[in-house]
Image: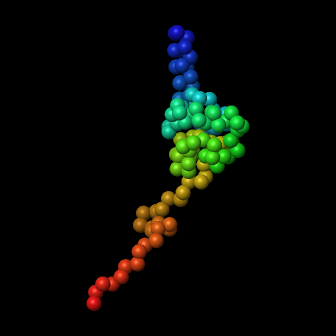
């Protein structure tokens, strides 16, 4: 019982110490994945289960095979240190600067109602 506690604490410390470094989805253990902010036990299990069918080729492959990981989640996980084959996620939507109109939104025409 005491040995299990020591091993669990050691694994958590190792995961916390390695959280500053990039963690590759193809090589990470359950504890390493759990150490990433935004990855809980269920997501780490889904990643590990999908990895059993082969390593992830790239971020789009991971997003296709792991339920719940879309572009916004992938961008957040990448910012927290998760990589796929050593690559961070590059598909994050570009941020719009303050005061700049959004390109995907069409402004309605304003009509002059004065007569």
Give the colour scheme shown: rainbow
Residue sticking out furthest to the bottom: 115
Q: Does 79 sit left or right of 86 as displayed? A: left
Q: Quadrant of the C terminus?
A: bottom left
The x, y position of residue 37, in whole percent, is: 50, 37
- Residue appearing at x 68%, y 41% in the figure: 56
Residue 4 appears anywhere in the view: yes
The x, y position of residue 72, in whole percent, is: 52, 50
Residue sticking out furthest to the left: 115
Q: Does 109 sit left or right of 38 as displayed? A: left
- Residue appearing at x 56%, y 17% in the figure: 7
Residue sticking out furthest to the top: 1
- Residue appearing at x 65%, y 37% in the figure: 50
The answer to whether residue 70 is above or below residue 44 is below
Give the quadrant of residue 87. top right
The x, y position of residue 9, in whole percent, is: 52, 19
Residue 88 appears anywhere in the view: no
- Residue appearing at x 51%, y 15% in the figure: 5
Q: Nearer the viewer, residue 95 or 62?
A: 62
The answer to whether residue 106 is above or below residue 79 is below
Counting labels gives 0
Give the quadrant of residue 85. top right
The x, y position of residue 1, in whole percent, is: 52, 9
Q: Does 3 sit left or right of 52 as displayed? A: left
């Amino acid at each position: 019982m005491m040995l299990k506690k020591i091993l669990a604490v050691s694994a958590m410390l190792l995961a916390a110490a390695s959280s500053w470094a990039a963690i590759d989805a193809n090589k990470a253990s359950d504890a390493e994945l759990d150490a990433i902010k935004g990855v809980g036990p269920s997501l780490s299990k889904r990643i590990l289960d999908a990895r059993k069918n082969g390593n992830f080729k790239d971020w789009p492959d991971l997003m296709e095979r792991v339920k719940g990981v879309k572009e916004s989640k992938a961008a957040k996980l990448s910012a927290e240190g998760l990589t796929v084959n050593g690559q961070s996620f590059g598909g994050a939507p570009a941020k719009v600067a303050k005061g700049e109109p959004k390109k995907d939104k069409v402004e309605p025409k304003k009509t002059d109602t004065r007569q």
